[in-house]
Image: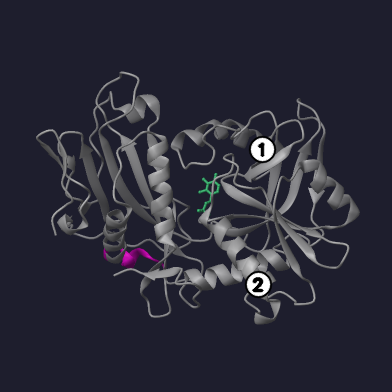
Amino acid sequence: MSSTAKTNGKVHIAALDASLLTIELAETLKPIPTPGTYTFGDIKTDYMLVMTFDPLTGWSAPEIKPYAPLALDPASNCFQYCTNVFEGMKAFLDPAGKPRMFRPEQNMARLVTSAARMALPMFDPDALLVCINKLVSLESRWIPALPDHALYIRPTMIGTKPSIKVGASDHATLYVIVTPVGPYFQSSSGGVSLLAVGEHVRSWPGGTGGFKLGLNYSPGFVPQRIASDLGYDQVLWLLGEEKQITEAGAMNFFAVIEREDGGVNVVTPPLDGTILPGITRDSALVLLRAHAADPSKQLLALPASKPVYIEERVLTVPELAAASAAGTLLECFGTGTAVLVVAIERIGDVADPALKTITDIVMSAGNGLGPVGQALWDKLLALKEGRDDFHGWSVLCN
Ligand SMILES: *Cc1c(COP(=O)(O)O)cnc(C)c1O
């Protein structure tokens, strides 16, 4: 099948075409390291997927080739103006030993949105997904056959216009690398602690926090260091005088608060542009709503006697502190592809700009995952590992 031809004057601009994918095999394959001996993101596998966009000719034929450095002009737009967008996905082995991805079309759609926000060239997300499928299949020997282990997939798109002139990049490189990963946080039974930082803001109304752009993350490295120095694992990102909660590190935030009628409210901030629209967040909400609609079906392993109510609304640190003091803050957790669901065991509420007075907010469910977080963890992992199915979310790679 030939690419959809678009004419720009006399010039043929090629669309991204998965049928043109070429595979250059490596002469020797690397040894696979023992799981547990490496940390997140360190291991380079045998292959990468690369394609480039040139404004005169369009998309190149996608190539899978041995993992190697990229050669880029030092004036490239991505180095000067941060035209760099990415995705985070995982492939798990199913019970038959076949790799599976979870709702991958959602990642492709989000990458298109991110690229559009950075005024980068557009591409066919379905064509990219076909190529990623091939890469994952070729690299499946890297997926550790252990629970909660996976191949992390990092699609990346950068602006490569070779000019320091301020402006959109009409050249781009789209590449995908993969790396084997185990549980993100070593203590799987415990949880993470968060420092609620108000001085440094991750996102703001009208800003870019709702997109997966590289430039959203590096300004967080200094507050992350402050949190670490004070003994907290991650930053709880706030907005405004009322200490509105946006996200936790690079995860979406959920709180479970007991209601007077015996049920629980599961609260997460709404997608108002300051929140990254996490696919794990969305999946959790879909599962919780389906469970709430008919608890007797036991979609989630939660007692039918404790009805669940889902609220996408503004949540503040003072509200959490008050609930914690009243004993109704049952659990808090973060969600994301890297962690799946992780318990938040305490939140340091900072009272003064000098970071002298910090009061810890604690959850009454204790340190590990509470019932709601645990039920979501169990269901999501079963879906990702292809042990269970829901709406065809788990997609076989072949
Ligand atoms: C990627 C990301 C998430 C989680 O998104 P998932 O699609 O669930 O992996 C949450 N917050 C931020 C800031 C992120 O970058």
- Residue positioned 15% across, 38% down in the render: 57
Count residues near mark 1 (Cα–Cα under 10 Å), then give few for <14, some for 14-19, many for 20+. many
Q: Is residue 131 in view from this perspective?
A: yes
Residue 366 disc label: none
Q: Quadrant of residue 249?
A: top right
Q: Quadrant of residue 89?
A: bottom left
For the N terminus, the image quarter is bottom left
- Residue positioned 84% across, 61% down in the render: 259
Disc 2 within 8 angstroms of ligand 1 (CB): no
Task: Provide residue 299's location: percent of width, then percent of height.
Answer: 62, 76
Q: How is the image coloured?
A: one colour
Count residues near mark 2 (Cα–Cα under 10 Å), then give few for <14, some for 14-19, many for 20+. many
Task: Tell whether position 141 is magenta.
Answer: yes
Disc 2 to disc 1, how far (Cα)? 36 Å
Near-viewer residue (313 or 96): 313
Near-viewer residue (355 or 198): 198
Task: Provide residue 245's location: percent of width, then percent of height.
Answer: 69, 42
Q: Amino acid at mark 2?
A: His
The tag earlier along the polypeptide, 2 or 1, is 1
- Residue positioned 23% across, 46% down in the render: 51
Count of marks placed on residues: 2
Helix, strand or loop under label 2: helix
Helix, strand or loop under label 1: helix
Mark 2 sits on what residue? 291
Task: Provide residue 213's location: percent of width, then percent of height.
Answer: 45, 38
Residue 227 disc label: 1
Q: Amino acid at mark 1?
A: Ala
Does residue 358 appear to the left or right of 340 in the view shown? Answer: right
Disc 1 within 8 angstroms of ligand 1 (CB): no
Task: Provide residue 201's location: percent of width, then percent of height.
Answer: 63, 32
In the image, which residues are magenta? Answer: 138-144
Q: Is residue 151 in view from this perspective?
A: no
